[in-house]
Image (spheres, helix red, strand yellow):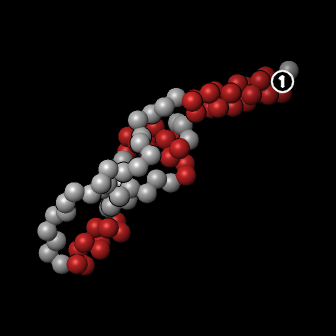
Amino acid sequence: MVIRCLKYGIAALLLVLIAIQAIPYGRTASNPPVISEPEWDTSVTRDLAVRACFDCHSNETHWPWYSRMAPVSWWTLDHV
């Protein structure tokens, strides 16, 4: 009895996870073009910012594979 309930619970969870993939959530396929950049004091500072921050905090975001799978995609879009 417990195993049957567990199987139905897992099946229901999988169906919900599959169904929520159909919900679109605001991310466009491409990033908007880069219009301008701040004036960097040195090229080292810019390189550090590119390495540490640009992936999420710029128009040059590289979306990881899991950013296309709900509900993680919802959190990722909100975070970026």
Q: How many marks?
A: 1
Give whichever of 75, 50 is nearer the camera.
50
Residue 49 at x, y = what percent? 28, 67
Q: Residue at x 62, y 27 (%)?
A: 19
Residue type of the residue flagged with mark 1:
Arg
Residue 24 at x, y = what percent? 48, 31
Q: Quadrant of the N terminus?
A: top right
Q: Quadrant of residue 42?
A: bottom left
Q: Residue at x 14, y 75 (%)?
A: 41
Q: Quadrant of residue 78?
A: top left
Query: Which residue carries the number 1 mark?
Result: 4
Judge whether residue 48 can be spotted in this image. Answer: yes
Vertical placement of 24 versus 57: above or below?
above
Q: Residue at x 40, y 35 (%)?
A: 26
Q: Is the residue marked by circle 1 packed among few (<14), some (14-19), or many (20+) residues within 10 Å?
A: few
Give whichever of 34, 19 is nearer the camera.
34
Q: Residue at x 68, y 27 (%)?
A: 15
Indicate left or right for 34 with 14 as reference: left
Vertical placement of 62 versus 76: above or below?
below
* Mark 1 element type: helix
Vertical placement of 47 versus 56: above or below?
below
Vertical placement of 21 versus 54: above or below?
above
Give whichever of 36, 40 is nearer the camera.
36
